[in-house]
Image (cartoon, helix red, strand yellow):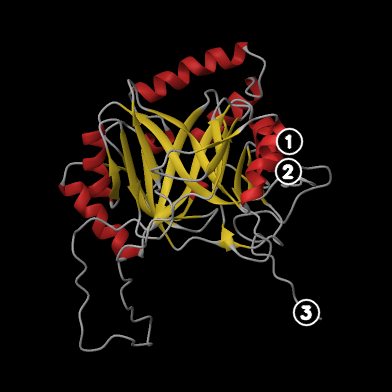
């Protein structure tokens, strides 16, 4: 009899859902998006943003007085669009429709209007507000930028398998060349409502659920969500969503060639005076090697490599959320990464807790106790 191994079972994730728990996908979504196209931000200083972007490993695709487009080496859309604005904030994600007709289908189903994008991007878009107030854009027919010369992964000698002889490894301390945008993580006070919106409107499916220890019966509080391309494997998560006292951007992640590119690129960032938030390590959900940095505006950005790829057949894993359970190996999660270090962000979260507990949303006293237990774990 064939043994069907479930990669979610074992050390880190419990095997599958219990009866009556969230299925992790919509039965009949309006469309199914193909990928994350780009992220749009507002920032007051485009020159400062560009300087960090180049050190992080992006290439400038467009720079005007009011707009900055940053790209990776892969062909396709820019990874990040930055508009000049009075304060730094995430405007929202843009997703690539699987078929050009899907933009019109989504517009018709939601009572919105599809509109042409600027000539610098090309194509058509429909904009929707998610339940957390983010602007979500679905695009099709955008211009594809040609591929740039990529960073070549090193040749490794694994154990006794000697693929490299009479040669040395000398990776330079230089920017890790970003290949592409991988995922974005957002926090919301209306987690289940917002999760269901993305599953129903964009056809995303959940790879892993996390719940607060002792509160599994109250449902999950975080999900790692991927695109549904049928039997074509996709990133373990294109979007991750977590419950919290404030609706906000958490971080975004960008793929690089390998561990050496990530580590040498990190040394380059340190030498330029930029601040590592947490790393280097390997995550559990998603399995990717990670390294987190703060940009000059305080936004968290991640270099990653060697992430999991799932097709549509894999059902969600379930696991308790703990701070110590964020990595298979690496240094302990820092206070900066967890949002506990002194600064503006923790103060905003504290004020947000007071507001959230007064409002009608999913962040109540039980959830607050669960979050505090995670932070102390």
Residue 44 spot, x, y in % from top left: 29, 26
Q: Secondary structure at mark 3?
A: loop
Outermost residue toward the right in this view: 19
Mark 1 and mark 2 lie on one chain; the one further toward the N terminus is 2
Which residue lies under the disc numbered 3?
2
- How packed mark 1 is, by other alpha carbons closer than 10 Å (few <14, some 14-19, many 20 or more), is few
Q: Is residue 256 visible?
A: yes
Please tell me which residue lies in front, 22 or 205: 205
Q: Is residue 64 left or right of residue 338?
A: left
Quarter location, residue 322: top right
Q: Quadrant of the N terminus?
A: bottom right
Q: Residue at x 73, y 35 (%)?
A: 109
Q: Secondary structure at mark 1?
A: helix
**3D distance between C-alphas at marks 3 and 2:** 36 Å
**3D distance between C-alphas at marks 1 and 2:** 8 Å
- How packed mark 2 is, by other alpha carbons closer than 10 Å (few <14, some 14-19, many 20 or more), is some
Mark 3 and mark 2 lie on one chain; the one further toward the N terminus is 3
Q: Secondary structure at mark 2?
A: loop
Q: Are marks 3 and 2 in contact (CB under 8 Å)?
A: no
Residue 297 spot, x, y in % from top left: 30, 31
The nearer-to-camera label among 1 and 2 is 1
């Amino acid at each position: 009899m064939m043994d069907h191994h479930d990669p979610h079972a074992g050390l880190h994730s419990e095997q599958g859902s219990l009866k009556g728990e969230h299925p992790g996908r919509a039965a009949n979504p309006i469309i199914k998006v193909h990928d994350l196209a780009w992220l749009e931000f507002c920032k007051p200083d485009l020159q400062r943003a560009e300087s960090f972007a180049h050190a992080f490993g992006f290439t400038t695709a467009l720079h005007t007085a009011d707009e900055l487009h940053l790209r990776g080496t892969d062909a396709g859309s820019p990874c990040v669009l930055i508009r000049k604005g009075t304060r730094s904030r995430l405007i929202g994600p843009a997703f690539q429709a699987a078929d050009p007709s899907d933009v019109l289908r989504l517009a018709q189903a939601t009572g919105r209007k599809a509109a042409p994008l600027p000539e610098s991007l090309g194509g058509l878009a429909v904009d929707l507000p998610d339940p957390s107030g983010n602007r979500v854009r679905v695009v099709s027919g955008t211009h594809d930028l040609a591929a740039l010369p990529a960073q070549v992964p090193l040749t490794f000698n694994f154990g006794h398998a000697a693929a490299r002889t009479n040669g040395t490894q000398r990776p330079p301390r230089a920017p890790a060349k970003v290949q592409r945008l991988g995922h974005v993580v957002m926090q919301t006070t209306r987690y289940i409502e917002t999760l269901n919106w993305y599953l129903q409107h964009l056809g995303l499916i959940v790879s892993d659920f996390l719940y607060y220890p002792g509160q599994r019966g109250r449902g999950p509080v975080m999900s790692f969500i991927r695109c549904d391309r049928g039997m074509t494997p996709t990133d373990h998560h294109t979007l991750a969503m977590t419950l919290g006292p404030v609706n906000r951007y958490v971080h975004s992640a960008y793929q690089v060639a390998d561990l050496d590119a990530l580590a040498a690129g990190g040394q380059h960032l340190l030498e330029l005076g930029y601040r590592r938030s947490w790393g280097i390590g390997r995550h559990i959900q998603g399995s990717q090697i990670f390294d987190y940095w703060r940009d000059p505006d305080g936004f968290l950005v991640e270099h990653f490599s060697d992430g999991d790829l799932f097709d549509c057949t894999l059902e969600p894993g379930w696991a308790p959320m703990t701070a110590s359970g964020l990595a298979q190996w690496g240094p302990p999660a820092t206070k900066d990464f967890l949002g506990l270090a002194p600064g503006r962000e923790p103060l905003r979260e504290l004020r947000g807790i007071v507001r959230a507990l007064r409002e009608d949303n999913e962040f109540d006293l039980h959830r607050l106790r669960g979050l505090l237990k995670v932070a102390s774990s």
